[in-house]
Amino acid sequence: MAAVQLLLLLLLCWEAALCRAFTFVKLYHKKPAEPVDSVPDCWFLQKLDHFNGADSRNWMQRFFVNDSFMQPGGPVFLMIGGEGPANPAWMKYGSWLTFAEKLGALCLMLEHRFYGLSHPTKDMSVENLRYLSSRQALADIAHFQTVMTKQLKLGDRKWVVFGGSYPGSLAAWYRLKYPHLAYAAVASSAPVNAVVNFPEYLEVVQNSLARNHSACPKAMKLASDSILELLQYKENYKKLTEDFRLCKLLQLQSDMDISFFLDSIAEYMMDIVQYNNDNREFEGVKGGNVTIQVVCDIMDNESLGAPYDQFVVVIQTILNALGQKCIDAQYKNFVQEMRDDSWEGPASQGGRQWVYQTCTEFGFFQSTDSDSQPFSGFPLSYHIQQCSDIYGSAFNLSTVTDAVQQTNEYYGGFGIKSSRIIFPNGLIDPWHALGINSNLSSDCFAIQMEDAAHCADMYPERPGEPSVLPMARNFIFQLLTKWLQS
Ligand SMILES: *[C@@H]1O[C@H](CO)[C@@H](O)[C@H](O)[C@H]1NC(C)=O
Ligand SMILES: *[C@@H]1O[C@H](CO)[C@@H](O)[C@H](O)[C@H]1NC(C)=O
Ligand SMILES: *[C@@H]1O[C@H](CO)[C@@H](O)[C@H](O)[C@H]1NC(C)=O
Ligand SMILES: *[C@@H]1O[C@H](CO)[C@@H](O)[C@H](O)[C@H]1NC(C)=O
Ligand SMILES: *[C@@H]1O[C@H](CO)[C@@H](O)[C@H](O)[C@H]1NC(C)=O
Ligand SMILES: *[C@@H]1O[C@H](CO)[C@@H](O)[C@H](O)[C@H]1NC(C)=O
């Protein structure tokens, strides 16, 4: 074992040093927001295009290692990166490490191409974004696994892949498409079914708000209606600007401007529900103390005034907790930032890339097109329009619809057929509507977690968390133990 560790250290540190040396100038300005002490960046020589044998271009992909728990013959755990910078905090915290400790696993995390510091091309022009897709990302993982297995002499150690949210889908799909490489997968809160229009998202938001506070969604709906009324007259724009702490005086010249303002406000509430009462603090995330409970208590407090006034207090409470001074609700600014294709741009950590993936693979557009939800004003057409405003006029409803259908054809959507996959889903979390919520077979399991939020099973244990979480983690651990023994 000592020999293996020495080899790892030599190899990885050497690679890290090498790559730092030649990418330092380029990377200097773009350190991810929350670096974690003593987890060094490692770099892997990756192919640009896995589906064209005539294209030999390469690039450097970032990964992280924790070999503290590695035992002879133990498995390899791979945390799959997703739609943002890979956060090295995961190499120190998280339920997968407690599994790794008990099972003697080597832990690796691979950043997703185009996100964080993993830059396959010189910029993110629409031309270059052709190389951004879940299929290329899965092939990256396969190449990484193959080369690492050889370089680190990992022999026939079994690889288990982990991921939450979009990377949860990648984990399931890696097991599906590369069964000779992936032995098992834990796909937390994975939206495996692509949809163009996703009005169910806000329906779950409504149900989650109503769970302990039956009057809460109704009050929020009344607040939304009041906002719509205020928007009808220009003399109210100053009041709206002040109440919602907009960075600039509200200006509405088009339907897109109106939708963007309403969407921006509603997204603060969506986040509260999606991440309700979870334990993400180790990732450096702020605002976790504003929960559904806090929000609905405000919407229930008559001394604060009408529902509109209560909702204003909700948004201000959230902004205070996030330490955010104002909301930029100008659609023009947003489009301008999203169109910036440089690696230094304001949306370069993931915004430009992820919306591109929604326009070309997944849809997932969280619209107000259902009557059973509390918000108004951002229909599917608004989201589709964003695709063409940001990436060019080649995108429209029919191209997005085709792309989404292709995605489901390729991966199977809800009908995914595989084995040794676990699908945990928090039932508070709106994304569970696109996940696997019933057991598919005798070795493909769904775990439904009452009262739990997005990816909550992946976070470290915490006193006061929903009691279903320790049970879910234990269920995952028992299954992995059983599968790895056979
Ligand atoms: C691996 O994770 C454990 C658990 O958090 C931590 O104590 C250890 O320092 C980590 N090892 C490395 C090499 O990062
Ligand atoms: C509802 O109340 C129960 C009991 O207090 C609590 O455990 C649960 O987390 C609450 N759910 C939500 C969504 O606030
Ligand atoms: C209602 O809001 C007022 C003003 O912020 C506050 O003093 C009071 O404690 C709140 N009432 C409840 C029941 O939360
Ligand atoms: C949440 O925490 C922040 C900073 O720690 C604090 O300023 C704020 O008052 C808290 N908000 C609530 C609703 O507890
Ligand atoms: C959508 O875009 C495609 C390709 O850019 C184009 O061929 C098609 O005519 C457009 N369809 C509609 C309904 O605009
Ligand atoms: C799936 O099967 C397991 C084990 O039999 C069971 O505990 C669990 O409740 C089932 N999940 C669902 C969503 O029915």
Image (cartoon, grey):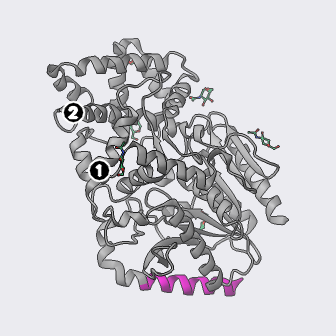
The residue carrying mark 1 has its beta carbon less than 8 Å from ligand 5: yes
Quadrant location of the C terminus?
A: bottom right
Residue drawn at x 47%, y 72% as measured from the top left: 62
Residue denoted by label 1: 393
Looking at the picture, tell me which residue is in the foreground, 323 or 169.
Answer: 169
Predominant SS along the magenta part: helix
Is disc 2 placed on a helix, strand or loop?
loop
Residue drawn at x 50%, y 53% as measured from the top left: 282
Looking at the picture, tell me which residue is in the foreground, 25 or 439.
Answer: 439
Vertical placement of 470 versus 109: above or below?
Answer: above
Quadrant in the rendering for residue 8: bottom right
Q: What residue type is labelled 1?
A: Ser
Residue denoted by label 2: 254
Point out the stretch of residues depicted in magenta: 1-18
Q: Does the magenta stretch include residue 3?
A: yes
Q: Separation of disc 2 and disc 1 at Cα?
A: 18 Å
